[in-house]
Image (cartoon, helix red, strand yellow):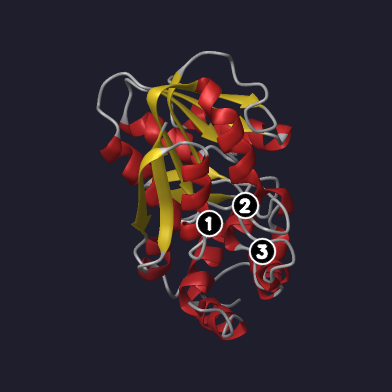
């Protein structure tokens, strides 16, 4: 029977075309064995039974076909929290942590009522709820299956200040005034080559692209948002690296003031906010 070290070497070679083959081989083997990665370093000479070898070969084959690791292992870390993800939800990206950070810095640490649109598996809403127990978060999502995942994540994180509602944008949002409407709505242009390459074909298209221009979701939300925001209420959206100018124009046309754009860790424009 092969050892852990031998399987890791085989997995690394099989995944040679991936960006970080060694790390991916480790993550997938730890998943199959039901351990953490430190176990692999501690017991490199441990022999692995044939059933687990077959399972490892299967998940490696899935990864070679570009299935995202998050879908294979069923989880993804975001904001130092672990979230369940499924094929019904977008996979959380590190870039989206900028939106969480910006909202935390921009809003006071007093009671706030915040809406997260297109919440997916609930990462943004749950991260904010975790950081600010005195805030009340509502996550909106059109996919009922994604809503169920988000609810499980909130329960697993023991959060009692976040709830989730099935809604086509703000259509089912309870009619009251909120301090902020935020989110990471779909913004990739329809027909973009990235949608058919790499990992993206595995993710729900409805969470990736809103239409040919990539701006359609922003337009809908800006048209709806004013009726739900308190005076001076905040709008903050994640967007594509090349959409700052277009989104700024949409914000100005909607009557927003104090518009600012923030860059992610790669120096790309990523989050734009403004106030009604």
The quadrant of the picture occupied by the N terminus is: bottom right
Question: Residue at left 32%, top 33%?
Answer: 131
Counting residues from the N terminus, which is met first, the one under dot 3 or under dot 2?
Answer: 3
Question: Residue at left 65%, top 54%?
Answer: 208
**Residue 201 located left or right of residue 162:** right
Circle 2 is placed at which residue position?
A: 215
Q: Is residue 226 visible?
A: yes
Q: Position of residue 127 (x, y in %)?
A: 40, 38
Counting residues from the N terminus, which is met first, the one under dot 1 or under dot 2?
Answer: 2
Tell me the distance, in whole angstroms, between the alpha carbons under discs 1 and 3: 24 Å
Q: Position of residue 177 (x, y in %)?
A: 47, 16
Q: Quadrant of residue 84?
A: top right
Tell me the distance, in whole angstroms, between the alpha carbons under discs 1 and 2: 8 Å
Looking at the image, is mark 1 or mark 3 nearer the viewer? 1
Looking at the image, is mark 3 or mark 2 nearer the viewer? 2
Q: Position of residue 189 (x, y in %)?
A: 67, 61
Circle 1 is placed at which residue position?
A: 246
**Residue 104 located left or right of residue 7:** left
Relative to 123, does residue 248 appear above or below in the rendering?
below
């Amino acid at each position: 029977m092969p050892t852990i070290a031998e399987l890791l070497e085989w997995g690394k070679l099989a995944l040679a075309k991936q960006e970080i083959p060694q790390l991916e081989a480790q993550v997938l083997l730890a998943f199959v064995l039901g351990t953490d990665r430190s176990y692999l370093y501690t017991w490199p000479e441990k022999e692995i039974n044939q059933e687990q070898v077959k399972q490892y070969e299967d998940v490696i084959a899935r990864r070679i076909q570009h299935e995202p690791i998050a879908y294979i292992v069923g989880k993804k870390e975001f904001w130092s929290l672990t979230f369940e993800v499924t094929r019904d939800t977008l996979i959380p990206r590190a870039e989206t942590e900028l939106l969480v950070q910006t909202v935390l810095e921009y809003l006071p640490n007093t009671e706030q009522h915040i809406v997260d649109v297109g919440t997916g598996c609930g990462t943004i809403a749950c991260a904010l709820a975790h950081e600010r127990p005195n805030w009340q978060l509502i996550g909106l999502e059109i996919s009922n299956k994604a809503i169920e995942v988000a609810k499980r994540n909130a329960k697993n994180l023991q959060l009692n200040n976040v709830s989730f509602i099935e809604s086509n944008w703000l259509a089912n949002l309870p009619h009251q005034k909120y301090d902020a409407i935020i989110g990471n709505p779909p913004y990739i242009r329809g027909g973009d080559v990235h949608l058919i390459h790499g990992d993206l074909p595995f993710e729900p298209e409805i969470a990736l692209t809103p239409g040919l221009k990539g701006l359609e979701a922003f337009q809908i939300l800006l048209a709806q948002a004013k009726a739900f925001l308190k005076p001076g209420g905040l709008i903050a959206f994640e967007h594509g690296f090349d959409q700052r100018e277009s989104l700024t124009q949409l914000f100005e046309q909607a009557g927003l003031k104090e518009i600012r754009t923030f860059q992610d860790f790669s120096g790309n424009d990523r989050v734009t906010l403004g106030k009604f």
